[in-house]
Image: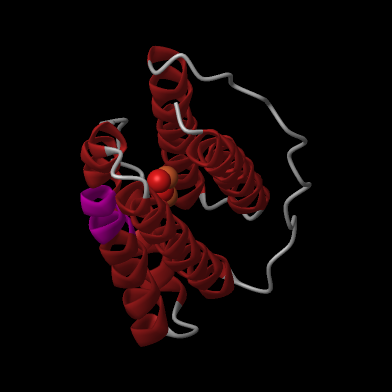
Amino acid sequence: MNKEIEAAFNDHLNAELYSSYLYLSMSNYFADQNLEGMSNWMTIQADEERLHGMKFVDFINERSGRVILQQIDAPKIEWACPLEAFQDSYDHECLISRKINALVDLAVKHSDHAAIAFLQWFVTEQVEEEAAAISIVEKLKKIGDQPMGLFMIDEQLSGRTLEA
Ligand code: OFO
């Protein structure tokens, strides 16, 4: 495995594990607010991010690279309101999309077709991730301070189950 790609994939593995940590932190913020549906949604999101990280672990190992686990930064722990938390999650997904695009550019630069093919799953996944987060952000903006609307969204998000 090309050393520059190996290092970039290890860095991205850390980014996926940080994503998991961030969403677990949001899940516990929502649990503290008695918004169990939003807490469930974020717990599932945290589980998915760990699985995304494991895809990088498996790929690096399959290509005879070396997985190097790095320190995971402490995530934010408090938000002013549910909207702020979901806005943060949308912004974070946009950041991850930019990182995935940079990995694709790097794989193209090195003509690493296996890495390009591997990354296509993530390119598609990021479209879904951004869409899911912005959809909740827009709903929360519409309901504003109405508790009934908040409880309805919370109930809706309680039904999410692990897919990835
Ligand atoms: Fe939320 O995304 Fe991973 O890749």
Which sits in the foreground, 6 or 149?
6
Q: Compared with residue 113, is residue 57 higher up or lower down, i.e. above or below?
A: above
Q: Reply above or below: 10 against 152.
A: above
Q: Percent position (x, y) of residue 156?
A: 29, 53
Q: Which image quarter is the N terminus in?
A: top left
Q: Across the whole image, how many numbered discs are drawn on residues?
A: 0
Q: Can you give x and y, in whole percent of width and height, for residue 36 in the image? A: 50, 45
11, above or below 103, in the image: above
Chief secondary structure of the magenta portion: helix
Magenta region includes residue 162: no
Counting from the top left corner in percent of width and height, residue 135 is at 29, 70
Q: Between 86 and 5, which is closer to the camera in this rendering?
A: 5
| Residue 127 included in the magenta stretch of the image | yes
**Percent x, y of residue 116:** 26, 43
Residue stretch rendered in magenta on the structure: 123-129
Identify which residue is drawn at 68% across, 26% down.
Answer: 69
The quadrant in which residue 44 appears is top left
Left or right of 159, for residue 33: right
Q: Is residue 32 left or right of residue 30?
A: right
In the depicted view, which residue is nearer to us: 11 or 91?
11
Residue at the location (46% across, 52% down)? 38
At a point 23% along the width and 38% down the height, the residue shown is: 113
In the rendered image, which quarter contains the C terminus?
Answer: top left
| Quadrant in the rendering for residue 163 | top left
Is 155 or 78 nearer to us in this picture? 78
Left or right, 159 with respect to 54, comes to left
Q: Name the colour scheme.
A: secondary structure
- 10 relative to 97 in the view: left or right: right
**In percent of the image, x 68 and y 74: which residue is there?**
80
